[in-house]
Amino acid sequence: MTTNKPVIFVTQPILPEGLSILESIGEVHQNDRGRPLTEDEMVEIATTLDPDAYVGTFAEPHRVFSARVIEASKRLKVIAWNGLGYDHIDPNAATARGIYVTYVEFHCATVSDHAFALMICAARKIVPAAQAVKAGEWERQGTFFNMNFVGTNIHNRTLGIVGLGRVGGGLARRAFGFDMRILYCDEVPRTALEAQLGVERVSFDDLLRQSDFVCCCVPLTAGTQRMFDAAAFAKMQPSAMFVNVTRGACVNTDALYAALRDRRIEFAALDVIEPEPLPTDHPILRLDNVLLVPHIAGLTRETRSQAHIITATDCVRVLQGYRPKLVLNPAVEKVRPLPEWRGTEAG
């Protein structure tokens, strides 16, 4: 360390508007390796740089904020995370050390938009149709070329949402505008949305059997890991379309591949998959009934900018001795209570 400022390590690229907030109070170091760091590399950073704060701006494929990394980070006060899913963070280890873990919920509406967009692309065969036009097939095949891309309606169909939290609830609101029947499966009854939108709470098995579209909107936990397995896909209708916008590990990729290959379900539209990035020789990429995009559900110009500002601001608040706006591990307040921020902004 070259100054008396707190040391901040950013694990993945941060936009200038977020970086300037961090630099206003800290000595900022960024991951310069052009790829996500491994747990071992994070331990090395913890022991050599000894940061006061970690800032994460994108979903990490490794346990970069694991108990091992947290234990090695002797001066750590805050892990500022730009997202909701926290499978790469050990919040219990952080809480035990009095380390605040912050999060961002700003981009949930954007993820809900993306989930609905994937549904539309899947149902209406938009991507293969556009690719065929660019390849010259329309000119070669002529007038009835468009009959190769007869899709299915979304309106008046049944949507099953697994996890009716912020993202799933937003998807339900969008589906309501398309006159869809909406089923949901959630540990928590969502009575407000039931009254507002007429959504129906059903069991996981009933949701799978009845839905034309099934969307995974649950966070990755021990209970949701690979919950979409061979048995789950076997219960879905052969015409069903599967969408995932949360975490790839909620799905058994081999089971999904087999279900798509054998046409036990019609289509899958995926923002996430396990592993990420997916090897180019993976057999699922050779199927014509899968659409895979590279974990972009929360990535828009507007949401990235605002989310990075929120992440940086909450990081600065903790480093200045104040409680952040959004605390992922609220039990930490009993271990290391902090006063509320009284100003207009941190830093």
Image (cartoon, helix red, strand yellow):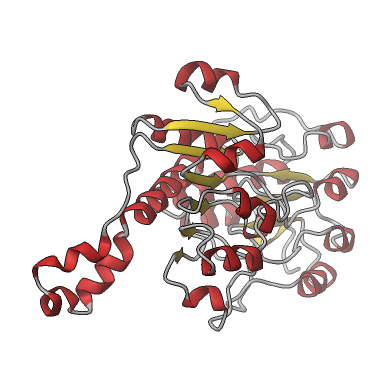
The quadrant of the picture occupied by the C terminus is top right
Relative vertical location of residue 33 with respect to residue 239 in this rendering, above or below: below
Q: Quadrant of residue 147?
A: bottom left
Left or right: where 39 falls relative to 150: right
Relative vertical location of residue 20 with respect to residue 30 in this rendering, above or below: above
* Residue at image location 61% in from the left, 38% down from the top: 163
Q: Quadrant of residue 274?
A: bottom right
In the foreground, 56 or 133: 133
Residue 6 in sight = no
Total labels drawn: 0
* Residue at image location 53% in from the left, 38% down from the top: 210
* Residue at image location 55% in from the left, 84% down from the top: 281
* Residue at image location 30% in from the left, 54% down from the top: 151
Left or right: where 129 falls relative to 70: left
Question: Where does the image place residue 310, in percent across and percent down from the top left?
Answer: 55, 44
Left or right: where 31 falls relative to 305: right
In the foreground, 219 or 55: 219
Left or right: where 242 falls relative to 82: left
In the foreground, 87 or 187: 187
Question: Where does the image place residue 286, in percent across and percent down from the top left?
Answer: 48, 78
The quadrant of the picture occupied by the N terminus is bottom right
Residue 97 in sight = yes
Relative vertical location of residue 73 with respect to residue 107 in this rendering, above or below: below
Question: Where does the image place residue 14, in percent across and percent down from the top left?
Answer: 53, 60
Question: Where does the image place residue 3, in percent across and percent down from the top left?
Answer: 72, 64
Q: Residue furthest top?
A: 195
Q: Residue furthest bottom?
A: 281
